[in-house]
C-alpha cells in the first residue's frame, strides 16, 4: 500500500500537470470507484464539471485537489459531507470543496493523452482544459484501480483546528477535507510540531512502532518506512513509548524525514506494477532499503563496522517487522 513518499510523488505530478486546469468532462466507468460519494454518480459528475483545480495537497497519505467552481449565482457548490454545513455556510451559500483521492492498495492517478488506449482497469476519466504554454500537455486525468479498494469522491473542506495550512501544497490554505481533519500532521509537513508529537508519544504507553503507525499521532508512516526509520534511529519497534527520551524521539523524527526524503528522490518504493507516478513510472527506493524485506541478509551498518549481524523478521500486527538484533536490541521491558 502506498505510503507518504509514494503519495507525495503523485501529488507533485498533479501539481505539474493538473493544477490550474478546468475539468471539462467526467466519465465514470465503474461506479464502485466513487462509492464514497454518497449522493451518487450524477452528483459526483455535477460537482466536477466546470471546476478548476486550484492545487494538489497532501496530509500523510490523504491526497486532495481543492476546487474552485462558481455556479450561475456566483457561489461555490456544496458537496456531500460527513457533517452538516454550518449556519455561516448556509447563510452565504458557499463552502470550499475538494476532490479526494484514496489510492488504496492499487489505485493510480495517471495523466494521459486522449489518443492513448484505455487502461485495463480504468475506472474514472476526467477531461481537462488545455494547459497554458507552448508544449503539448496530456488532456486526461485517469483513475485506474485493479483491486477497487481506492476511489474518488467530492467532499467539503473545513477550517484546520490550529489555523495552519491543511497540508503540503503549492498555495497552502488553512482548510482540510472533513475526512482528513482527524489525522495528525506528517514529518514532512512544515507545520509539524515535534513538541506536540513528543508529548502525545510519551502519553501513549504502547510500543514505538504501533505509535508510528497511529495516524492520529503522526501521519504518513506505514510499515515499510516505520522499519526503515527505526533502523536508521537504532531503535527497536517494541520500545515502550513512555521510556523514550527527548533526544531519541528527535532522532526518530529526523530519521523519518531523511528516509522519506531519500525515498522521494528515488520516486518511491515499487514492489510491483501497482504503484506508479502520474506518468506510469515505478519508483526504485526498494533497492536502498536497509531493513524492510531483508530477512537473513547482513545488516549494512554492522557489516560496515566489521561486525556480523543478520536482519531478522518478527510477526507484528499480522504483518512483519525487520530489525537488526545487534544495533536495534530488543528492550528488556519491551511489551509489544
Image: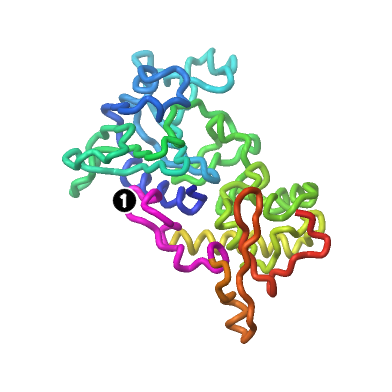
Q: How many marks?
A: 1
Residue in view at x 41 percent, y 41 percent: 107
User: Taking 200 as reference, is 244 above or below it?
Assistant: below
Near-viewer residue (301 or 96):
301
Q: Secondary structure at mark 1?
A: loop
Q: Is residue 291 magenta?
A: yes
User: Looking at the picture, how far across and down is residue 174, in whole percent?
Assistant: 55, 36
User: Looking at the picture, how far across and down is residue 158, in whole percent?
Assistant: 56, 29
Residue most extreme to the left: 115
Q: Is residue 270 magenta?
A: yes
User: Looking at the picture, how far across and down is residue 65, in whole percent?
Assistant: 42, 36
* The residue stretch that appears in magenta: 266-293
Residue in view at x 74 percent, y 51 percent: 201
Near-viewer residue (255 or 227):
227
User: Looking at the picture, how far across and down is residue 239, in whole percent?
Assistant: 75, 59
Residue in view at x 77 percent, y 47 percent: 204
- Kindly indicate the quadrant of the structure image that contains residue 118: top left
Circle 1 packing at 10 Å, graded few (<14), some (14-19), many (20+), is some
Residue in view at x 57 percent, y 17 percent: 84
Residue at image mark 1: 280
Q: Is residue 268 left or right of residue 290?
A: left
Amino acid at each position: 500500500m502506498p505510503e507518504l513518499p509514494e503519495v507525495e510523488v503523485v501529488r507533485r505530478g498533479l501539481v505539474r500537470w493538473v493544477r490550474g486546469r478546468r475539468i471539462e468532462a467526467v466519465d465514470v466507468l465503474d461506479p464502485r470507484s466513487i462509492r464514497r460519494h454518497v449522493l451518487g454518480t450524477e452528483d459526483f459528475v455535477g460537482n466536477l464539471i466546470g471546476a478548476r483545480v486550484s492545487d494538489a495537497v497532501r496530509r500523510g497519505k490523504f491526497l486532495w485537489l481543492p476546487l474552485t467552481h462558481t455556479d450561475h449565482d456566483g457561489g461555490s457548490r456544496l458537496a456531500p459531507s460527513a457533517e452538516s454545513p454550518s449556519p455561516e455556510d448556509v447563510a452565504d451559500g458557499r463552502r470550499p470543496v475538494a476532490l479526494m483521492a484514496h489510492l488504496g492498495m492499487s489505485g493510480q492517478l495517471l495523466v494521459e493523452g486522449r489518443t492513448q488506449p484505455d487502461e485495463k482497469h480504468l475506472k474514472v476519466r476526467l477531461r481537462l482544459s488545455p494547459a497554458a504554454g507552448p508544449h503539448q500537455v496530456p488532456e486526461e486525468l485517469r483513475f485506474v484501480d485493479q483491486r477497487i479498494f481506492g476511489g474518488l469522491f467530492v467532499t467539503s473542506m473545513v477550517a484546520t483546528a490550529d489555523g495552519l495550512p491543511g497540508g503540503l501544497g503549492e498555495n497552502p490554505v488553512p482548510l482540510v477535507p472533513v475526512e482528513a481533519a482527524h489525522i495528525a500532521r506528517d514529518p514532512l509537513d512544515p507545520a509539524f510540531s515535534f513538541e506536540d508529537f513528543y508529548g502525545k508519544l510519551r502519553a501513549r504507553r504502547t510500543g514505538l512502532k504501533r505509535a508510528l503507525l497511529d495516524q492520529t499521532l503522526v501521519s504518513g508512516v506505514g510499515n515499510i518506512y516505520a522499519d526503515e526509520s527505526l533502523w536508521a534511529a537504532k531503535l527497536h519497534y517494541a520500545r515502550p513509548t513512555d521510556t523514550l527520551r527527548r533526544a531519541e524521539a528527535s532522532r526518530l523524527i529526523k530519521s523519518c524525514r531523511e528516509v522519506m526524503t531519500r525515498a522521494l528522490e528515488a520516486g518511491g518504493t515499487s514492489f510491483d506494477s501497482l504503484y506508479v507516478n502520474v506518468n506510469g513510472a515505478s519508483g526504485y527506493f526498494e533497492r536502498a532499503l536497509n531493513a524492510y524485506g531483508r530477512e537473513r541478509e547482513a545488516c549494512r551498518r554492522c557489516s560496515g563496522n566489521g561486525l556480523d549481524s543478520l536482519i531478522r523478521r518478527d510477526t507484528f500486527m499480522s504483518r512483519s517487522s525487520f530489525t537488526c538484533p545487534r544495533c536495534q536490541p530488543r528492550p528488556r521491558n519491551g511489551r509489544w
